[in-house]
Image (cartoon, rainbow, N blue to C red):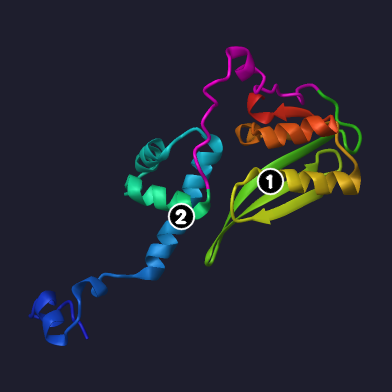
Amino acid sequence: MIDRKHRLSIRKQCDLLCINRSNLYYSPQRERDANLILMTEIDKIHLKYPSFGIRRITRELKEMGFSVNRKRVRRLMQVMGIATIYPKRNLSKLGKTSYIRPYLLRGLKIERPNQVWQIDISYIPMKRGFMYLTAIIDVYSRYIVGWQLSNTLEMETQTSAMNEAIKKYGKPEIVNSDQGSQYTSSNWLDCMEGHGIKISDGRKR
């Protein structure tokens, strides 16, 4: 096959063997691994800054040392099933503040089950893809009261996991999340308000 140290050029060797040079440089496994690494970082950025679009996410990745362009970031975000979360334009200033949730655990003595639940999303790279794990933990007992796996960040996954946990263990007084920006959708707010649960934003600690 191709000998990179041969006196004949790689181009000449490819011509003689009727090999397309592009095939010589193609390594699907290496590219797949590189994409999974990028997807992990894209997910971290998206969870922290859900309003960041493709351009800003690309800029963040470049500042981290990745060689990437917007086209590639767009494609990976489509594969991951995530999209930029834009604030609603018709919200008044008062309406916007209603989406701001305080951190309710400061100074709070947690002394019983179902007093506070913590919900978090983790990104799990796998050999051939990735999954999102939604986990709900009772802060007092440290018991996992609910969990669900999904290949997208659709809020239905979180509300479904929460509803199932409530059916099994009853409702908590407070639900806290360190990824509060993920939990401002109308579906999530309706779910919490429907159960009479207080929302705590752990980012405000």
Name the amino acid, label 1.
Glu
Label 1 SS: helix
Q: Is residue 92 visible?
A: yes
| Residue 143 in the image, given as x and y percentages of width and height | 83, 48
Answer with the quarter of the image where residue 149 lies: bottom right
Residue at the spot of label 2: 37
Magenta-tinted stretch: 82-107
- Decide which of 187, 110 is in the foreground and name it: 187
Answer with the quarter of the image where residue 204 lies: top right
Which dot marks residue 79?
none
| Residue 159 in the image, given as x and y percentages of width and height | 73, 43
| Residue 73, above or below 23 | above
| Residue 151 in the image, given as x and y percentages of width and height | 59, 56
The residue shown at (40%, 48%) is: 74
**Quick check: 85 left or right of 179?**
left
Q: Closer to the N terminus: mark 1 or mark 2?
A: 2
Determine crowd level at label 1: few under 14, some 14-19, many 20+ residues with C-alpha closer than 10 A. Answer: few
- Decide which of 7, 124 is in the foreground and name it: 124
Residue at the spot of label 1: 156
Predominant secondary structure, magenta span:
loop
Residue 159 on the magenta segment: no
Determine crowd level at label 2: few under 14, some 14-19, many 20+ residues with C-alpha closer than 10 A. Answer: few
| Residue 197 in the image, given as x and y percentages of width and height | 82, 30
The residue shown at (65%, 45%) is: 121
Q: Quadrant of the N terminus?
A: bottom left
- In this rendering, the label closer to the viewer, 1 or 2: 1
Label 2 SS: helix
